[in-house]
Amino acid sequence: MKKTLVTFVAAMLVMFNVALADGDKVVKIKTTAVCEMCKARIERTLGLSKGIKESNLDLKDKVVTVKYNPNKTSPEAIRETIINTGYDADGQLANMKAHDKLPSCCKKTVAPH
């Protein structure tokens, strides 16, 4: 009886987590990232943000794909995080104070490398 109850509770928890995961959304945001350091910085900052499940920056096309929980964050908040990290996001200009603090190889005036 105890084993059956534990199995039932475990199954309910798994179903509950799957139901929550189905509500996740994905947004793609164009950035001004140029190198692996930029990639690491953006992905790390997004990873520390509330509601972000995962992020991946493709340096070839400079687009970060973000999987997020829409109950905890929004595409606007995600763009704002990228902007405050020092990078443009979908044409919105980077926070210049944050941009000026980036290493010289990460500034948007530098050629991709």
Image (cartoon, helix red, strand yellow):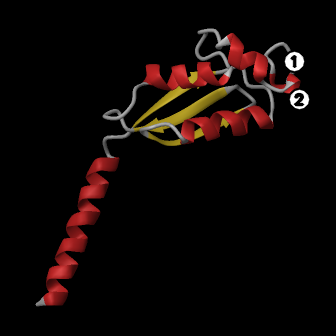
Taking 24 as reference, is 80 above or below it? Answer: above
User: What amino acid type is highlighted by mark number 2?
Assistant: His
Category of crowding for the residue at label 2, using alpha-carbon neighbours closer than 10 angstroms: few (below 14), some (14–19), many (at least 20): few
The residue carrying mark 1 is 110
Q: Tell how many labels.
A: 2
At mark 1, the secondary structure is loop
* Contact check, label 1 and label 2, Cβ < 8 Å: yes
Taking 93 as reference, is 76 above or below it? Answer: below
At mark 2, the secondary structure is loop
Spot occupied by residue 14 in the image (x, y as percentages of width and height): 28, 64
Q: Is residue 22 left or right of residue 1?
A: right
Tell me where residue 33 sits by quadrant: top right
* Image point (64%, 13%), residue name: 95
The residue carrying mark 2 is 113
Residue lying at the far left of the rendered structure: 1
User: What amino acid type is highlighted by mark number 1?
Assistant: Val
* Image point (63%, 41%), residue name: 44
Q: Is residue 8 left or right of residue 82?
A: left
Taking 85 as reference, is 42 above or below it? Answer: below
* Image point (69%, 25%), residue name: 62
Tell me where residue 96 sits by quadrant: top right
- Quadrant containing the C terminus is top right
Q: Nearer the viewer, residue 20 or 86?
A: 86
Q: Is residue 103 left or right of residue 45?
A: right
Spot occupied by residue 41 in the image (x, y as percentages of width and height): 69, 35
Q: Nearer the viewer, mark 1 or mark 2?
A: 1
* Image point (17%, 75%), residue name: 8
